[in-house]
Image (tube, rainbow, N blue to C red):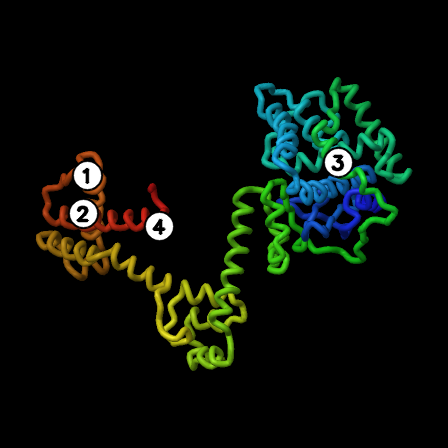
């Protein structure tokens, strides 16, 4: 608590860290600690209380590193951000390089007391998992290294004597193990040290720092693992609607994560604009009452149920995607449901009837063929389908019809025409090569 408090009052005196203690479920197991960043003014940190004191401090400092880095990196100019990326790339090149010895890469990636150093081993494997290669995790460990260096030096961060003594003892112990294993540690990079120094300068305050100790345990559901080390993160997090709509706790580590948040934000805003034009007023509520929706024998459509929702987003989805013939929307309109039905009909065409007709003609001279055999046996139907499938495959090589059976050719022609129509629709929807 004292370590987090000291760092908080020097790096983010205007923010609040809620510190919790308890098991930290993660990826089917347990982690040392975890952060849930609510916004750039508040975060929740959960730490395993069963850890040794030095590991508890290291884990908490690591999570603080996430918070410091994530809230500040979006404010950097492209040149300064490139400097941090260059430090990360140096590690990445070592981790993914030709050398089989992972000692240097681990020393670059992890702080000296991190258990992932495997400090008792003379030889270690390369750190190449998704977690190992995460830029956000790399940055958080750089912050731990930054604090470690300060502890061994002038202690400008103002950590208490008890914290300094615990961290120093842990570092000295690991350095002895490294010496025995003929390994070397790697401190904070010059680029990240400059970055953290720039944040620290001028921010020292006499305040206690915004750290609160939670009285009760925090459920795992309250936690998230955001990683926001990208230029566009600041724009997402500073949008006032992001927090209002509950989107600020979503992960934004990857391009896909950020795209999801942006799309959800846009969709919510669009729904609110739609609700202004389509208010859920007395007239609307009168229209939405329907005998189909009752507590005794409910046969209401999904569309009708969604149109009664208090959520503008749910009502928007119902109006644009689902079909409802109850008249709630003042007349039927073009919806995804109608479009889907019409597209399916256009793609199918008359293929089902064509194939059935071809089969009926094909089986006429087959012994034992008839309605009864089709219902209880189906061997002729199976044989016909195999012949049609073989014809489809054969045409791929021959670039034209192969079978001499007119019925097999007719069924295949109709199916392939349907496949072509389906491919055309997929290209229009940009789900197939275009």
User: Residue, x 47% and y 70% (percent of image)?
Assistant: 277
The residue wearing badge 3 is: 198
Percent from the top left, x then y, of residue 170?
83, 32
Q: Which labelled disc corresponds to residue 395?
A: 1
In this rendering, position of residue 185 left or right of residue 363: right
- Residue linked to disc 4: 429
State the CA–CA distance, disc 1 to disc 2: 10 Å
The front one of 426 and 232 is 232
Q: Position of residue 306 (x, y in %)?
A: 47, 69
Q: Quick one: label 4, few (<14), some, or many (20+) residues within 10 Å? A: few
Residue that label 2 marks: 412
Left or right relative to 215: residue 94: left
Q: Earlier in the sequence, mark 2 or mark 4?
A: 2
Whichever of labels 4 and 3 marks the residue nearer the N terminus, that label is 3
Q: Can you tell which of label 4 and label 1 is closer to the viewer?
A: 4
**Kind of element beneath mark 4:** loop
Which callout, 3 or 2, points to the residue nearer the camera? Answer: 3
Looking at this view, is 252 or 29 the one in front?
Answer: 252
Tag 2 or tag 1, which sits nearer the N-term? 1
Q: Residue at x 17, y 61 (%)?
A: 371
Instruction: Name the side, left or right, on which 323 lies relative to 50.
Output: left
Rendered view: 149 above or below 266: above
Sequence-wise first label, 3 or 1:
3
Measure the C-alpha gap from mark 3 to mark 1: 69 Å
């Amino acid at each position: 608590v004292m370590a987090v408090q000291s760092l908080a009052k020097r790096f983010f005196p205007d923010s609040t860290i809620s510190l919790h203690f308890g098991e930290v479920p993660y990826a089917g197991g347990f982690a040392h600690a975890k952060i849930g960043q609510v916004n750039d003014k508040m975060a929740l940190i959960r730490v395993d209380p069963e850890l040794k004191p030095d590991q508890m401090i290291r884990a908490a400092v690591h999570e603080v590193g996430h918070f410091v880095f994530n809230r500040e990196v979006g404010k950097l100019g492209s040149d300064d951000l490139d400097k941090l990326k260059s430090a990360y790339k140096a590690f990445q090149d070592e981790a993914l390089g030709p050398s089989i010895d992972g000692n240097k890469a681990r020393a670059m990636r992890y702080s000296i007391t991190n258990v992932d150093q495997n400090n008792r081993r003379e030889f270690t494997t390369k750190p190449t998992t998704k977690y190992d290669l995460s830029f956000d995790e790399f940055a958080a460990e750089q912050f731990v290294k930054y604090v470690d260096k300060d502890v061994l030096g002038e202690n400008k961060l103002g950590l208490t004597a008890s914290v300094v003594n615990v961290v120093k003892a842990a570092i000295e112990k690991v350095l002895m193990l490294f010496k025995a294993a003929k390994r070397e540690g790697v401190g904070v990079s010059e680029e990240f040290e400059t970055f953290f120094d720039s944040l620290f300068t001028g921010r020292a305050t006499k305040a206690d720092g915004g750290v609160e100790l939670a009285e009760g345990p925090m459920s795992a559901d309250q936690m998230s693992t955001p990683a926001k080390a990208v230029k566009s993160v600041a724009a997402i997090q500073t949008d006032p609607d992001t927090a209002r709509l509950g989107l600020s706790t979503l992960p934004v580590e990857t391009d896909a994560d950020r795209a999801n948040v942006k799309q959800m934000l846009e969709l919510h805003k669009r729904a609110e604009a739609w609700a202004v034009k389509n208010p859920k007023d007395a007239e609307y509520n009168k229209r939405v009452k329907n005998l189909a929706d009752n507590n005794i024998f409910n046969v209401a459509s999904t569309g009708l149920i969604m149109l009664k929702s208090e959520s503008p987003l749910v009502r928007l989805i119902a109006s644009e995607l689902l079909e409802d013939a109850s008249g709630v929307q003042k007349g039927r309109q073009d919806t995804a449901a109608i479009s889907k039905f019409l597209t399916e009909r256009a793609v199918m065409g008359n293929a089902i009837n064509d194939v059935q007709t071809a089969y009926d003609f094909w089986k006429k001279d087959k012994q034992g063929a008839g309605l009864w055999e089709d219902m209880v046996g189906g061997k002729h139907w199976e044989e016909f389908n195999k012949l049609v499938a073989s014809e489809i495959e054969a045409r791929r090589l021959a670039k034209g019809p192969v079978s001499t059976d007119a019925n097999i050719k007719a069924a295949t022609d109709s199916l392939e025409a349907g496949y072509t129509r389906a491919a055309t629709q997929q290209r229009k929807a940009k789900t197939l090569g275009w």
